[in-house]
Image (cartoon, helix red, strand yellow):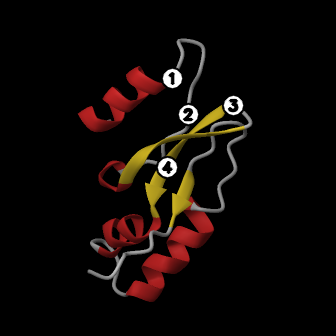
Amino acid sequence: MNSKIEAAIELYLNDDETVHLPDGMDDAFVGIARQFNIPFAVYSRTKCIGILLEEMDSIEEAEDYFNFNVASSYLGGGTPAFIETVEEDD
């Protein structure tokens, strides 16, 4: 776990709270969010696929792996969320 994630967990979680973190996706970490007062980690979907693409042969293979093995994994409360960001035109 990188220092950005450790700092967010220390700052935004109470001692009795936990969040699930997907393996190998530290560089795609965006922050901590809450829904119904349950905390969860938030990751950039685009960055996650970019991380997977470094070890896979095509964008299609990386997207398929991400959709099936990462984004579809339900781990109960604290399951991470994956966000698509909208870039504003300058």
Residue at the disc numbered 3: 37
| Marks 4 & 2, CB-CB < 8 Å contact | no
Of mark 1 and mark 2, the one earlier in the sequence is 1
| Residue beneath the point at 38% across and 31% down | 8
* Nearest to viewer (mark 2 / mark 3): 3
| Residue beneath the point at 65% across and 55% down | 73
The alpha-carbon separation of the residues under discs 2 and 3 comes to 12 Å
The alpha-carbon separation of the residues under discs 3 and 4 comes to 15 Å
Point out which mark residue 13 bears: 1
Q: Is residue 77 left or right of residue 20?
A: right
Point out which mark residue 19 bears: 2
Q: What quarter of the picture does the N terminus occupy?
A: top left
| Marks 1 & 4, CB-CB < 8 Å contact | no
Of mark 3 and mark 1, the one earlier in the sequence is 1
Which SS class for mark 1?
loop
Of mark 4 and mark 2, the one earlier in the sequence is 2
The alpha-carbon separation of the residues under discs 1 and 2 comes to 9 Å
Residue at the disc numbered 4: 42
Kind of residue sitting beneath label 4: Val
Of mark 1 and mark 4, the one earlier in the sequence is 1
| Marks 1 & 2, CB-CB < 8 Å contact | yes
Q: Is residue 29 above or below residue 72?
A: above
Q: Is residue 32 above or below residue 86?
A: above
Of mark 3 and mark 4, the one earlier in the sequence is 3
Closer to the camera in the image, 25 or 41 = 41
| Residue beneath the point at 26% across and 80% down | 90
Q: Position of residue 60 (x, y in %)?
A: 46, 87
Which SS class for mark 2?
loop
* Nearest to viewer (mark 3 / mark 4): 3
Kind of residue sitting beneath label 3: Asn
Q: Is residue 6 above or below residue 75?
A: above
Q: Position of residue 56 (x, y in %)?
A: 35, 77
